[in-house]
Amino acid sequence: MPDSAQSPETLLVFPCAFPVKIMGLTNDALAQSVLDVVLRHAPDYDAACMEMRASSGGKYVSLTCTINATSRSQLDALYRELTGHPLVKVVL
């Protein structure tokens, strides 16, 4: 089945805007590291669109990257690389 069609494994229809939320400990290298990973999987992502929010205590930061998702395999690979990154605690 082509990626542009809706498949039984997902309710998504590709291509689509897909927000990825990444959380980690506050670290100067987190945003750049996440951006590098996102750009490997979504080269058309505009880095200026990355949203960053600090937790109320300042210990954690969340980053939201809304990518143009083109396939389930693209999303799976992106999630695998992000969840395996040492600075990343959670990916939603």
Image (cartoon, rainbow, N blue to C red):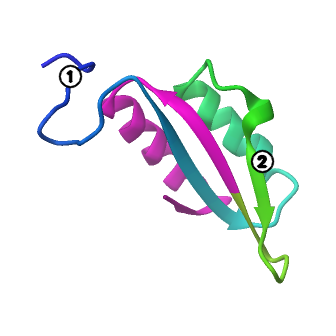
Residue at 16% over, 42% down: 9
Q: Is residue 61 above or below residue 44?
A: below
Residue identified by numbered label 1: 5
Asked if labels 1 and 2 touch by Cβ distance under 8 angstroms, the answer is: no
Give the CA separation, mark 2 to mark 1. Answer: 33 Å
Residue at 58% over, 54% down: 21
Magenta span contains residue 82: yes
What's the residue type where badge 1 is placed? Ala
What's the residue type where badge 2 is placed? Ala
Q: Position of residue 88 (x, y in %)?
A: 62, 59
Residue identified by numbered label 2: 31
Q: Which residues are magenta?
A: 63-92
Query: Quadrant of the image for the N terminus?
Result: top left
Q: Earlier in the sequence, mark 2 or mark 1?
A: 1
Q: Provide the secondary structure element on which disc 2 rests.
A: helix
Q: Position of residue 2 (x, y in %)?
A: 19, 16
Q: In this rendered view, identify the residue nearer to me: 8 or 77.
A: 8
Report crowding for label 2: few under 14, some 14 to 19, many 20 or more residues within 10 A (C-alpha).
many
